[in-house]
């Protein structure tokens, strides 16, 4: 044999990363996270408004369906002071998210307190009518309940 043992070959210079290289990579990752993180928070706010509006519209439709199917009046109550809404026997109390502001416009006869109102659905397919606007700093969604047809329409901006 040649006398050279395979382990005695010239040492390799490729042994891994230096501490300086690792710090540079971690610094770049931290910089990228600092740029991306605020936009993720803003995107989440818009999603909260949309998802809350879809859920609220679905619960309004469920209350309308209950009034028609049971031939009895049903009402969905929104209490902004407690940040809850519900419909007796149809929708269990549900919270309104803290980051979402809600403006409720109902007829004066449907106003319970300064911060609470209800939307009534009648067996004949009509309703008391209402307009709900949900918003945050980024997006807005509005829900309209037609008094004549009890139709629930939603628009997201």
Image (cartoon, rainbow, N blue to C red):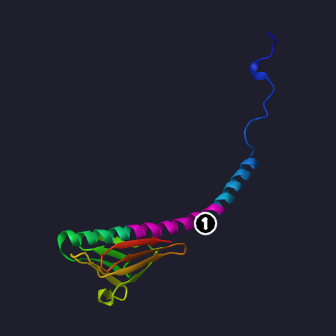
Residue at 51%, 75% in the rendered image: 136
Where residue 112 appears, as percent x and y from the top left, is 30, 87
- Asked whether residue 89 is in view, the answer is no
Q: Residues within 10 Å of mark 1 (few under 14, many from 20)?
A: few
Residue 121, magenta (yes or no) = no
Q: Residue at x 63, y 61 (%)?
A: 36
User: Where is residue 45 drawn, in percent x and y?
Assistant: 51, 69
Residue 111 appears in which quarter of the rendering? Answer: bottom left
Residue 5 image-quadrant placement: top right
Let me know if residue 88 appears in the view. Answer: yes
Q: Quadrant of residue 92?
A: bottom left
Front in this rendered view, residue 61 or 16: 61
Whether residue 44 appears in magenta in the rendering, the answer is: yes
**Predominant secondary structure in magenta?**
helix
The quarter of the picture where the N terminus appears is top right
Q: Tag 1's secondary structure?
A: helix
Residue 111 or 29: which is nearer the viewer? Answer: 111
Region in magenta: 35-54
* Residue 127 in the figure: left or right of residue 114: left
Horizontal and vertical percent position of residue 6? 75, 19
């Amino acid at each position: 044999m040649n006398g050279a043992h395979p382990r005695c070959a010239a040492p390799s210079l490729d042994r891994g990363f230096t501490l300086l290289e690792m710090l540079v990579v971690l610094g770049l990752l931290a910089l990228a996270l600092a740029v991306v993180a605020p936009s993720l928070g803003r995107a989440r706010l818009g999603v909260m408004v949309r998802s809350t509006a879809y859920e609220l519209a679905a619960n309004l439709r469920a209350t309308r369906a209950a009034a028609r199917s049971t031939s009895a009046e049903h009402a969905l109550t929104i209490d902004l002071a407690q940040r809850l809404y519900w419909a007796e026997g149809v929708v269990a109390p549900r919270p309104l998210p803290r980051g979402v502001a809600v403006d409720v416009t109902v007829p004066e006869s449907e106003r319970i307190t300064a911060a609470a109102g209800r939307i009534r659905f009648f067996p004949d397919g009509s309703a008391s009518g209402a307009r709900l606007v949900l918003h945050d700093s980024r997006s807005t969604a509005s829900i309209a309940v037609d008094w004549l047809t009890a139709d629930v329409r939603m628009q997201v901006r």
